[in-house]
Amino acid sequence: MKEFFNKLLTGMSLGIVVCLIPNALVGEILKLLIPYAPFLETILNVSIIVMSLLPVIIGVMIGIQFKLTPIQTCSVGLAAFIGSGVTTVATDGTMTIAGIGTVINIGLTAALAVLFVQWLGTRLKDWTLLAMPALTIFLPGIIGLSILPYVKNSSLIIGEGIMYVTSLQPIVMGAIIAMIFSVLILSPISTIGVATVIMLSGIGAGAANLGVCASGVGMCIASYRANNFGTAIAHIASAKIQMRNFFMKPKIAFPMILTAGILGGLGGLFQVIGTPYSAGFGLAGFVGPLKYLSLVGWNTESIFISITLFIALPIVLNLVFLKLFESKLKWLKYEDYKVTYE
């Protein structure tokens, strides 16, 4: 069971990186440049289209982890797409594909699909090419689609807890929300989805961004020795790369959670704000700091706060806490952050 879960999370992590990082790297920057260079809109649109393919890519990556055949792998990808919630059908029959879907349900559907295609094995014989994709879509895929509403409701429960936190004193609220989001970004739960469902705004949204930033920067620093430079930098765009490692060893996130608490508290003190649609991005594409600057205005004070809280302090605090947990307390090893591609 542990090995199955391990492979499932690895496939999900890699799929998220492949599909989400292109937009995370350039999305917000392109939005600033497009008014002056309209031709760049094509690049932005392409990166958004790729994001909607997340369920398929996660399914394919999971299939690769389980060493499935090409037909089995594609069947898992198709089932994950059906159960993801990416598509919506209007009453007039119009079908829309948008967003990235519900990541938890993508993983659940893919897991069912893997078990199903493994059970089928060679039973279909000459009918494999014809029947396996269809059966996988109609059984695991539709089961995933049927449980989608219940999985979505789980995000609402988390959201209700976060909404209660927003009623607390700003510094306390900022610290708690930042720590919550620093953990959510390492889980299959979408930080952006939670933030938009509860319409998290103001200091709460700013704290959420700081929490995501703490995990992204921290995981980048922590994983540098265990991985190559490119993989380490990718953590800033999406710390979900460490999802498998986090579930296997939750303690690897302790330095980032402590960093998030401090950043969130300071965010509450200095009134770092955001919107429901920016919360949960963190430093990816510079969404967090750019949205804060656009809301409060570009001036010397706001730029200094933005650079300090989103870049300088996350680096310094994570370095301090990583040193503490690794060298002094001996709780962590740099190998704990190794990302496996096979």
Image (spheres, grey):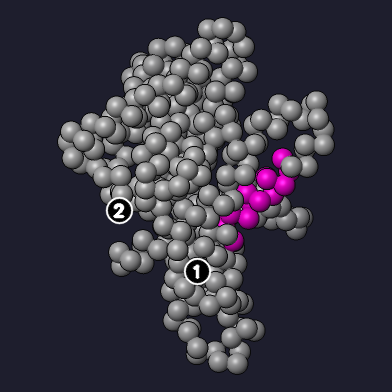
Task: Specify the quadrant that holds the C terminus.
Answer: bottom left
Q: How many marks?
A: 2
Left or right? Give the position of 99 relative to 328.
right
Q: Which of the 4 image quarters holds residue 323?
A: top left
Foreground residue, 268 or 31?
31
Mark 1, secondary structure of its residue: helix
The structure residue drawn at horizontal position 73% and vertical position 56%, both measured from the top left corner, is 95
In the rendered image, the quadrant that contains the N terminus is bottom left
| Farthest top residue in view | 300
Q: Which numbered disc covers residue 215?
A: none
Give, as a single range, the part of the protein colored magenta.
44-56
- The structure residue drawn at horizontal position 55% and vertical position 71%, both measured from the top left corner, is 73
The residue under label 2 is 248
As helix, strand or loop, the secondary structure at mark 2 comes to helix
Above/below status of 191 relative to 7: above
Q: Which residue is more in the foreground, 268 or 70?
A: 70
> Can you give x and y, in whole percent of width and height, for residue 203 in the image?
47, 19
Q: Which residue is painted at 79% across and 26% down in the image?
A: 35
Looking at the picture, which amino acid does disc 1 mark? Gly
Give 152 or 67, whichever is nearer the viewer: 67
Q: Which residue is mark 1?
A: 63
Q: Is residue 84 visible?
A: no
Q: Is residue 131 above or below residue 309?
A: below
Mark found first going from the N terminus, 2 or 1: 1
The secondary structure making up most of the magenta span is: helix
- Dot 2 and dot 1 residues touching (CB under 8 Å): no
The quadrant in which residue 225 appears is top left
How far apart, in angstroms, are the residues tagged by discs 2 and 1? 20 Å
| Residue 321 lies in the magenta stretch | no
